[in-house]
Image (cartoon, rainbow, N blue to C red):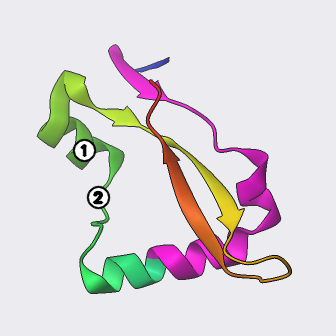
Amino acid sequence: DIEEDGEDVRFRSNYSSVDDSIEAVKRNVAKDLESGDIVRMSLQQAKDKFGSRLAIASLGTVKKEEGSEEVRIIYDATH
């Protein structure tokens, strides 16, 4: 947990698998934004919308196939 401007925000770092495949993660996120599966918002917008329920999940990745550059994004909701 971190405290920002007097408010508690649950935030965890991403897993190292994301560092190893950051370009594939960026492509997946762009595709999900375009399709409307996810939305982009600032931290302040998220705080305004979710209040004390806001929790930002860690991301991890798993290769879709051995030797492939494509990954499946894993959202860790263990907070």
Q: Choose between 45 and 54: the one closer to the eye.
A: 54
In primary-sequence order, the first of circles 2 and 1 is 2
Is 23 inside the magenta-drawn segment? yes
Q: From what the image shows, is residue 46 above or below residue 78?
A: below
What residue is shown with label 2? 41
> Label for residue 46?
1
Q: Is residue 13 left or right of residue 36?
A: right
Instruction: Estimate the x, y position of residue 2 in percent, counting from the top left.
Output: 50, 19
Q: Which residues are magenta?
A: 5-29
Task: For mark 2, give the secondary structure.
Answer: loop
Q: Choose between 6 and 56: the one closer to the eye.
A: 56
**Which amino acid, mark 2?**
Met
Near mark 2 (Cα within 10 A), the count class, few <14, some 14-19 or many ≥20, is few
Task: Tell me which residue sits at (43%, 35%) in the image.
Answer: 77
Confirm or deny contact between disc 2 and disc 1 (CB under 8 A). yes
Q: From what the image shows, is residue 39 above or below residue 32?
A: above
Task: Tell me which residue sits at (28%, 32%) in the image.
Answer: 54
Q: Is residue 34 left or right of residue 29?
A: left
Task: Tell me which residue sits at (73%, 78%) in the image.
Answer: 65
Alpha-carbon distance for marks 2 and 1? 6 Å
